[in-house]
Amino acid sequence: MAKSNQTVKGVKTKEKGYIRLFVQIFFFTLVGLIVINHALEESGKGISWLSSASLHAICPFGGVVSIYKFVTTGMFVKKIHESSFVLMFIMFILAVGFGPLFCGWICPLGSFQEWFGKIGKKIFKKRYNNFIPNKYDKYLRYLRYGMLALIIYKTATLGYLVFWNFDPYYTLFNFWTGEVAIGGLIVLGIIILASLFVERPWCKYLCPYGALLGIFNTFRIFKIKRNPSTCISCGACDRACPMNITVSKSRVVRNHQCISCLKCTSEYACPVAGTVQFATKGGE
Ligand code: SF4
Ligand code: SF4
């Protein structure tokens, strides 16, 4: 009986894993199509039903770096549009409810690192994502806040998209257009290489937008909660977490690095039903 229950959980877990994968593929494809269409528009061959917006126009972080200029001059930073502001607010509302859902489910660069990292997982198995000693790693995780502050300050004082010069997200989707900066190519190359050893290296250490959304983990409405009374201390939740968060030691995950991927929950990794949940109540 126990074996049959495990089998049923295994199948359901797989199905639920596919839901997230489907969402990630959907957004990756959508962004790819929008970028290709934008390039085709310039030669009059665009797909009429698809948005002709550029990648900048559909980037919510563009809204964040434009706030200062918009408040002080009523204008956007060059290449940024109203749509970035709208997306920025939508992502903030989502984050108040569910944390950095954008990072775990939508961001194509996050998905790309995750998919590429599967090669590293195959090569290094259990050692994958565990190469950097915790005594250094725990401080390195705050680098992305320095990055966030630097980009906002530089964009505000210089008045243009300084991040564009080394933006791996822009580079990933535009490397074929010849419109990318050498800095972006170098950063993307380093991320691809690092993904073979560390899961989501950009998200963990340098992403300024992930840093901002991570703050919402401290007060979000739906949280990752663990019930210590049913926990069997197997550590499966810790091993499943791409961001190396020790879920097995928390009642409520408030870590700024959580990306709301749900991999640690009883729907996925935790073998005890109802022990790790994505919920509003209990555990605190
Ligand atoms: S596995 Fe859990 S704790 Fe880790 S990032 Fe995903 S949702 Fe957050
Ligand atoms: S996977 Fe579930 S049972 Fe195992 S340590 Fe984590 S919370 Fe406890």
Image: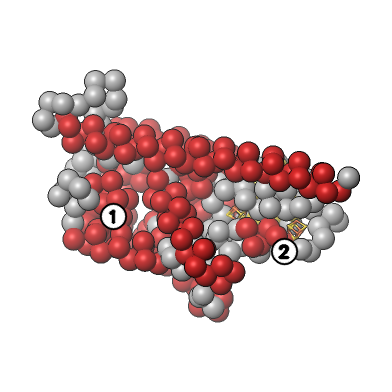
In percent of the image, x 51 and y 47: which residue is there?
A: 104
The local crowd at label 1, few if under 14, some if 14 to 19, many if 20 or more residues have their Cα within 10 Å, is many
Can you tell me which quadrant of the image ligand 2 is in?
bottom right
Is tag 2's residue or tag 1's residue first in the polypeptide sequence?
Answer: 1
Task: State the image quarter where residue 254 is shown.
Answer: bottom right
Q: Quadrant of the N terminus?
A: top right
Report if residue 7 is visible in the image: yes
Q: x%, y% of residue 247?
A: 68, 60
Above or below for 137 versus 157: below
The circle on residue 224 is none
Question: Residue placed farthest to the top in the image?
Answer: 49
**Labels 2 and 1 touching (C-beta < 8 A):** no
The residue mark sitting in front, 2 or 1, is 2
Relative horizontal placement of residue 274, taking residue 90 as reference (left or right): right
Q: Secondary structure at mark 2?
A: loop
Tell me the residue at 47%/48% (across/down): 103
Q: CA distance from mark 2 to mark 1?
A: 36 Å
**On the image, numbered disc 1 is attached to which residue?**
167
What amino acid type should be assigned to the residue bearing mark 1?
A: Asp
On the image, the x and y values in percent for residue 23 come to 49, 37
The reply to whether the residue tagged 2 has its Cβ within 8 angstroms of ligand 2 is yes
Q: Foreground: 118 or 146?
A: 118
Locate residue 66 relative to residue 203 in the image: left or right.
left
Give the residue displayed 22% in from the left and 44% down from the top. Answer: 77
Q: Position of residue 277 (x, y in %)?
A: 72, 46
Residue at 25%, 58% in the rendered image? 184
- Residue position for label 2: 235
Type of amino acid under label 2 = Gly
